[in-house]
Image (spheres, rainbow, N blue to C red):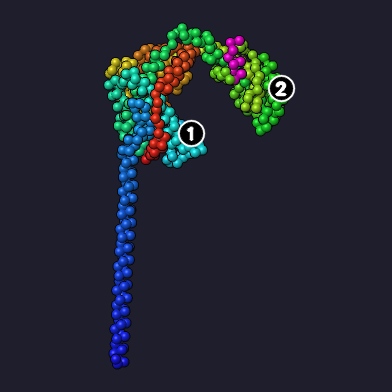
Amino acid sequence: MSKADRRRQKKEEELRAMREAEEKRKKKNRIIKKVVLFSLLGAIVVTAVSFLAVKLYNDDLDSGRSARNTAAVKSEHYTVDNTMMSYFIYDAYNSMMSRYGSYFTSNGFDETKPLKEQEYTDGVSWFDYFASSALASVRQMLILAEEAYKNGFSLSDAELEAVKTRVGFLEPSEYGRGVTSDDILRAETLSTLAARYDASILASLEPESEEIDEYYKNNSFKFDGVTYLTYNFYYELGRGSLTFDEAQTYANDLGKTKTEDEFREFITDYLKKTTPEITDAEIQSELDKITVVNPGYSEELDYSVWALNKERKKGDTFVTEMPGYTCFSTFMIVSPPSKDESPTKNVRHILIGTDRYGADAKKIADEVYEKLKQQGSSESAIDMLALAYSSDPGSAESGGLYDNLSEGSTVQTFNDWCFDEERKYGDTDIVVTSYGYHVMFYVGDGLSVYRSNVRSEIINSRYDVLYSDCAAANVLTENEGNIKKIPERK
């Protein structure tokens, strides 16, 4: 082979090697492209699947499908599912915020943040707090509903229509994600059944007049009112400069005074002596705090037992060391124990609250008032209208009834209408308060204050026994894990 042939052969081998290398490179690139392509396709598929999963999850939450099939609390014949439970939770929340919202927000609560992200106390969120509150109400509701079922008690057609009307004014989105008007209707129907049955129970426990007299005779100290003066002498470091012995001596010396004027003069001299820089205005501020009217009875407090003893007379004094408060306290009777025979009133009302009805409140109040007049201005009429329209949680389900209402226990305009001396059975009107518009119906005089209080204690004690038996007879199944799954409202 000539030299030229060898050069040509070598050239051909180099070219072949280059072609083979190029083929390998192209093949490798094709493989890489396929891997990249498959990787991209895989990522796209995963992203699509993830997006679809998130969408399906959110669609499920917004529809309430799973929540509606998830039991929060069950009794033998009734189930409160997660949409109903969400309604009860946010109903408790809305009620609390409408009454005390400014207080909570001024103390750091943020209405714009999810309840589950805000701590009520250590390890407990605000959602947990309202869920716990709602759960307590749901327990009682189911126990009463079961008793209603056992005793053949059910809502009338008129009551069911009234509940539908009430629900029609509620905005489902205010009560949780996925909650619908139908869910609220189921919750409110069950709640109304329990409430109306509860009212029938209470009516059956009404004591006779003689029973009230006898109960008061044996327990007058629980119901009598008393007025006394009281002042505390602290001996704990940081709350005053007195020693234990000094505080005890001052308290005993104050207990030797004979009249209200002497009692006040002693305190004035004491303040000037122990706090030389004190002003007359500050002294008067202290004196304004020493009068206590009708504090209520507690058998655990020795001064309470003393003050409400029938033997007490004006000017009697008593000195005691207050356990847990590091002070000695002196008391002087101003008005001895006596029963409060002030009159009370029975009244029905329908609150068209501005918190529920907003700018339409007056218009709706006028419409409800016209309905009342068209239906004969009767108690049965206002009973159903209250069930349908009233936004007062304390009386809506009991026909708007407030019985044995004492003077001064309500806002001024409401109070003045009820206690007008010219008021007679069947009087109606619209009264405006800070809560909204009240469609009023006057029922009549109630018991005296002390007899009303005795009656309430008798009924409550009977009810506690009866309800305890009902609770023991009805087993509830609660699922805390399911309740925690209830989503925040949007």
Q: Nearer the N terminus, badge 1 or badge 2? A: 1
Give the farthest residue toward the front. 1
- Residue drawn at x 36%, y 15% as measured from the top left: 427
Q: Is residue 113 above or below residue 444?
A: below
C-alpha gap between disc 1 and disc 2: 42 Å
User: Mark 1: which secondary structure?
Assistant: helix
- Residue 226 sits inside the magenta stretch: no
Q: Which mark is residue 103?
A: 1
Q: Nearer the viewer, residue 484 or 12?
A: 12
- Residue drawn at x 39%, y 30% as measured from the top left: 477
Question: Dividing the picture into quarters, in which one does residue 335 lie?
Answer: top right
Q: Are there few (<14), some (14-19), or many (20+) residues within 10 Å of tag 1?
A: few
User: Is any atom of residue 142 visible in this view?
Assistant: yes
Q: Nearer the viewer, mark 1 or mark 2?
A: 2
Q: Which mark is residue 249?
A: 2
User: Is any atom of residue 141 visible in this view?
Assistant: no
Q: Amino acid at mark 2?
A: Thr
- Image quadrant for the N terminus? bottom left
Residue 205 spot, x, y in % from top left: 41, 14
- Residue drawn at x 30%, y 62% as measured from the top left: 37
Q: Nearer the viewer, residue 480 or 117?
A: 480
